[in-house]
Amino acid sequence: MSVKLLVTNDDGYRSYGIRSLVGSLAKSYEVVVVAPDGPRSASGLALTFYRPLRVREFVFDGVPYYAVNGTPGDCVSIGLFHVFRDSPPKMVVSGINIGENISMLEFFMSGTVAAAIYAALHDIPSIAFSKRFESVDVLSPDSIEDGFGLASEVAKLVVDTFYRDGFPEGIDLISVNFPAKISSDTEMVVTKLAKRSINSKIYIRKDPRGRPYYWIWGDKRRRFRRGTDAHEVIVKGNISITPISLNFWSEAGYKSLVNIVKYLNEEFHTLIR
């Protein structure tokens, strides 16, 4: 029986990244794509509750596609609870994103990563793939398409390995980031998330009527702590493989907090008497 994978992203089903990834994975797996019908970058783990979702089904290169007019989280929902309702996929693979998703800031902001998070929350092994480009704005579509070829083959190698061996204990999902250029000197390195990868700014402009509007943007930072995904991808040009646990509970913090809450309870009961 063939192994079924759910593939998604946040750049939309037309993205070169997802098409290239699907082309590699379809050599060994039964791939089903459930992806947004257009770009949904920086959507995070947003779900659509306030309007109905529409799904368009078609087949491309022998692979079934479901284009959803919603977020990556919506796509994984449609995939797990509709498309795969009778038998869950063996793994959810998200990407390859146009642009890296490094640091905690981008990790929580990225729709590509959020799709993997949502799948992991439902106990489905998931991997998010993202690739750095030095300047997406000035690259031609052909350059972007060519940039995904080797990354897609490496992504398949990663999927093959973790499907065969499973995730190590304590890992819920894995975030993989490719550098701008992959060569024989490139290494795969286990990393942790950097804290911030962007120097955030607010740009203020005026519309034709003189009213101000605000644009959130930021420049990519260039210096990062060693051992982080950002340092390996941007500074050293390596492939970062970041293991993620969704257990955000802090044992050390819990022990410290017990005494503080004991004091707060005493003050609270004094306050309400």
Image (cartoon, helix red, strand yellow):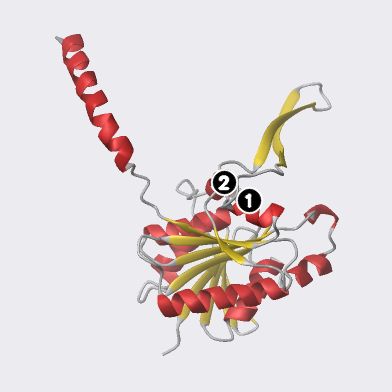
Query: Does residue 97 appear left or right of residue 273 in this picture?
Result: right
- Of 258 and 235, nearer the camera is 235
Locate residue 143 relative to residue 65 in the image: left or right: right
Label 1 sits on residue:
230
Q: Position of residue 47 (x, y in %)?
A: 47, 50
Q: Dot 2: what SS?
A: loop
Q: Residue at x 20, y 24 (%)?
A: 262
The answer to whether residue 219 is above or below residue 71 is: above
Which circle marks residue 96 in the picture? none
Callout 1 secondary element = helix
The residue lying at 21 percent from left, 14 percent from top is 267
User: Type of residue at label 1?
Assistant: Ala
Quadrant including the N terminus: bottom left
Nearer to us in this view, 26 or 171: 171
Relative image position of residue 25 (x, y in whole percent)? 58, 79
Tag on residue 194? 2
Q: Are marks 1 and 2 in contact (CB under 8 Å)?
A: yes
Kindly indicate the quadrant of the structure image that contains residue 224. Answer: top right
Residue at the image position 22 percent from the left and 19 percent from the top: 263
The amino acid at mark 2 is Ala
